[in-house]
Image (spheres, rainbow, N blue to C red):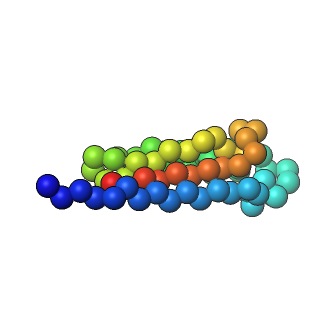
Amino acid sequence: METREQQDFVAVVERCGLLAWRGEPDLTQAFCAWDAACSGAISAIRHGVRFEMDGRIAEGCRTCRFCFTRR
């Protein structure tokens, strides 16, 4: 039986470039909604990758943390 090592990739965004566009909070919210929809389409079964996100800066979190795990 062949086993594969789990592989993790974590990207942490500490400063959102979209939030720098003052006066355009709707644009930031739209981008985050688009991002959530796209990342929600990642299927662990179909793509072999599990995706998790621990909140978003635009929602009041300190960072956006994108976690990908491949087995």
Q: Position of residue 13 (x, y in %)?
A: 68, 57
Q: Position of residue 37 (x, y in %)?
A: 49, 45
Q: Position of residue 10 (x, y in %)?
A: 55, 57
How many callouts does the rendering have? 0
Is residue 25 toward the left or the right of residue 9 in the image? right
Q: Position of residue 56 (x, y in %)?
A: 66, 44
Extreme-right residue of the structure? 22
Q: Is residue 42 visible?
A: no
Is residue 71 toward the left or the right of residue 53 in the image? left
Extreme-left residue of the structure? 1
Asked if 53 appears above or below 8 in the picture, the reply is above
Q: Quadrant of the N terminus?
A: bottom left
Please tell me which residue is depicted at 46% across the width and 48% down the height of the picture.
51
**Residue 18, image quadrant:** bottom right
Q: Quadrant of the C terminus?
A: bottom left
Q: Is residue 45 visible?
A: yes
Q: Nearer the viewer, residue 36 or 60?
A: 60
Asked if 44 appears above or below 18 in the picture, the reply is above
Please tell me which residue is depicted at 66% across the width and 50% down the height of the picture.
64
Q: Nearer the viewer, residue 12 or 25?
A: 12
Please tell me which residue is depicted at 63% across the width and 41% down the height of the picture.
55
